[in-house]
Amino acid sequence: VPIQGGEIITLNRPLPDHATVDEYWITPDGAKVVYYSDQDVYFYKHLYVVPIAGGNTISLTADIPEGAIASPSSALSKDALLSPDGKWVLFTIKEDTYSQNPYPHREIRMVSIDGGKSVVLARTSLPDHGGVFTPDSKLVIFTDDRNMDDIVELYSVSRDGGTSIKLSQPEQSVTEWQVTPDGKNVIYKTSSSGFYSVPTIGGAPVEFTGITAFRVGIRTFSADGSKVILT
């Protein structure tokens, strides 16, 4: 609805019985709305995009395998699924919740904000973990337990797909992480309460010496991105 008042426009298509719109996100330019709904088939939710002024609705997850369930990328924050330039959308898919597989297949995918074929960026064993774009929208950072040994590791992969690069040290489980404002590094904390900085393109992690407090976490960054605030 216009801020000055006026006609209310319904953006989603008519919903069948019991269907809902669970979440929505506005693109950085304010031109489009991405939303998450089971508007086509009850229970099986998909991501859709529609102009903010109303119009044609496009499914962003139309090419996922039959029976799979799509969900917004959930790494760090609910807004992580939109790239900073507003051109790309991250999401994850997994097998049907009722599948008998105890380790259901999961993928992190990316698709253009205009729809089309999605790109598989990574396969992951972690439930409900997605990725996050770097500020330049060129890389996606994510975590995975690839060896199924309860050690969560940090990875980066190109927006275009390809081989992912492991960023964290071996034998150290990552418990929290954030990308620096300039997109050049990831600051992460391990289960042993160590803090590290590593380039998003890969390289040797650098440990912040003298910080081992269990309750200290990564809070935010200074305005110029040169310092990280731990509390």
Image (cartoon, rainbow, N blue to C red):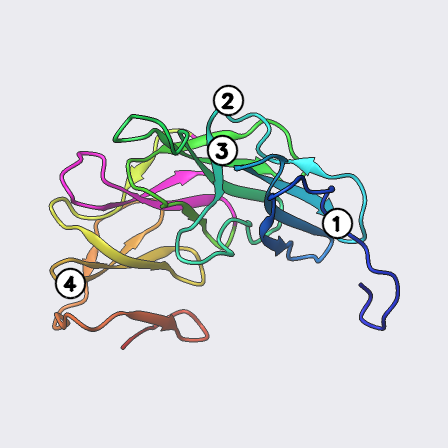
Question: Residue 182: x and y, percent?
Answer: 45, 60
Left or right: 145 in relation to 149: right
Q: Estimate the spatial distance between the alpha carbons at disc 2 and disc 1, rounded to whole Å.
A: 26 Å
Q: Quadrant of the C terminus?
A: bottom left
Question: Residue 130: x and y, percent?
Answer: 40, 45
- Determine crowd level at label 4: few under 14, some 14-19, many 20+ residues with C-alpha closer than 10 A: some
Closer mark to the observer between disc 3 and disc 1: 1
Tell me which amino acid carries mark 1.
Leu
Tell me which amino acid carries mark 4.
Gly
Q: Which residue is mark 2?
A: 66
Q: Which residue is mark 4?
A: 194
Residue 168 vs residue 119, the one in the foreground:
119
Q: Which residue is mark 1?
A: 11
Closer mark to the observer between disc 2 and disc 3: 2
The tag on residue 163 is none
State which quadrant residue 100 falls in. top left
Q: Estimate the spatial distance between the alpha carbons at disc 4 and disc 2, rounded to whole Å.
A: 43 Å
Question: Residue 140: x and y, percent?
Answer: 43, 44
Asked whether disc 4 touches disc 2, contact meaning CB atoms under 8 Å apart, the reply is no
Reply above or below: 188 against 86: below
Q: Which residue is mark 3?
A: 160
Q: Quadrant of the N terminus?
A: bottom right
Instruction: Name the residue: 75% across, 53% down.
Output: 52
Reply above or below: 95 against 224: above
Tell me which amino acid carries mark 3.
Asp
